[in-house]
Image (cartoon, rainbow, N blue to C red):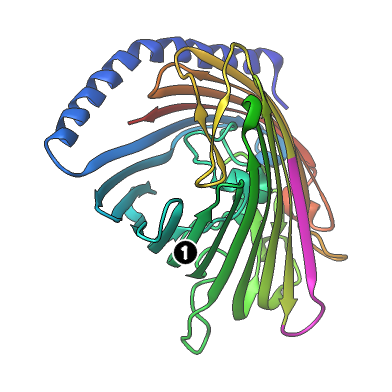
Amino acid sequence: MYKINTLTTLISLSFAASMSFTVLAEDFESLESRIDKLEKATTVKLGGRLHLDFAAYDGAYNPGNGTGTDIYVRRGRVYFASSHGDFSYKVILDYDDGETVLHGATVTYKGFGKDKKLNAGKLKEDISLQGMTSSKWVTSIERAMIPDTFQVGFNYGVQYSHAMQNGLRYSVSLTKDQELADGNEADGSLQLATTGRLTYSNTDNNEVLHLGLSASHRNWGSNDFSIRQTGEVRKDQNRLANFSSQVGAQQIDASSAMLLVGEFGYQVGRVHLSAEYGQIDVSANQGPDETFEGGYAQLGYFLSDNSRKYSKGSAKWDKPTNLNNQWEIFARLSTFDMTTDTSGTKAEVITIGANHYINESVRMSYNYVFGDVSGPSQVALTGSEDDGQAFVARLQYVF
């Protein structure tokens, strides 16, 4: 485990970095000014984000190796967008392990009427409140395990959504499964996913209430099922919620799976709450079907008069209303059970943290993470280490 003086030093250095980045923010603002001038000279909007992380971790997060540390680019993303009448276009490029990859590419049609959208291309599937909240504005450095697993990312397909005046919103999509399967069955036919989300929101009297249900049926034909989910610290060593050959799990020849997520969100004044419960029901071609489940509950608070925006059109949390020298604190309990009677692990994670929004572009985040791992495959995964802790800091620059 950490020595007290080591951890204190790490935290102190991170807060000192926060003050240094306040000075660097002036340089970022100068860069933004040049980008604005470029946008005015063209019809294309340019934007992006950079997430530079520092992590120190031990125990089950780095079994048998004491305390590990690392500095890495968690995200480096640039997008180009343009609108022409009822059509709009967006292309997202991502920096991934030294390569630039196509993260997303969508065409949106809004000619059906107000708050109705038809998307086609490589698009983000609409699953989970926290899953849909942008990584720029999610409260914690990493999402909780359930939305991080079930928000399966950008896949090729079509999606239709409608946000109604009475607070109801729904979306449906048909996509090629890439995240939980490899995209094609053995005979070459597509593995398709049908996804739907229904939400209700009320934003009267300076309060926000969000209720929702996400569901996704993933047709796999025949595919070995496995999930290796991080314990909310993005390092390969710490896949604490684990059902895979890595821990000797009895593999499931899966024909399909159903993902279900129940969503709750509430905000009043400086306080905001979120909670979600999710389960994945795996249908096997041979042998018993299996169900895995988990969820999280999160409480956040702004130290000054501030609140988070809520997007009715997308049914998700958005950025805070004030981003100039604002502090936010939060705490979260998260769990994900990936066990059967004979294999797999269960992870329980507590995260406490703080965000310093220096200005519209620059944010510093600090998370302290306590993780516990149990289950039939715990020893195979982490040996004698059944718990661990980590300190993670992030510099975010958004333009």
Q: Is residue 275 visible?
A: yes
Q: Where residue 176 sits: x, y (%)?
A: 48, 71
Type of amino acid at the residue the image marks with label 1: Gln
Residue at horizontal 56%, vertical 42%? 316
In magenta, the rendered stretch is 285-296
Task: Reply above or below: 109 against 71.
Answer: below
> Does dot 1 land on a helix, a strand or a loop?
strand
Instruction: Give the image quarter of residue 66.
Output: top right
Residue 340's image quarter?
A: bottom right
| Outermost residue to the left | 41
Nearer to us in this view, 213 or 131: 213
Residue at 57 percent of width and 54 percent of height? 151
Q: Residue at x 85, y 66 (%)?
A: 342
Q: Which residue is tagged 1? A: 159
Quadrant position of the N terminus in the picture: top right
Q: Is residue 129 above or below residue 363?
A: below
Q: Residue furthest right?
A: 341
* 27 relative to 66 in the view: left or right: left
Residue 130 x, y percent position in the rendering: 61, 43
Depicted 184 relative to depicted 21: above or below:
below
- The number of discs equals 1
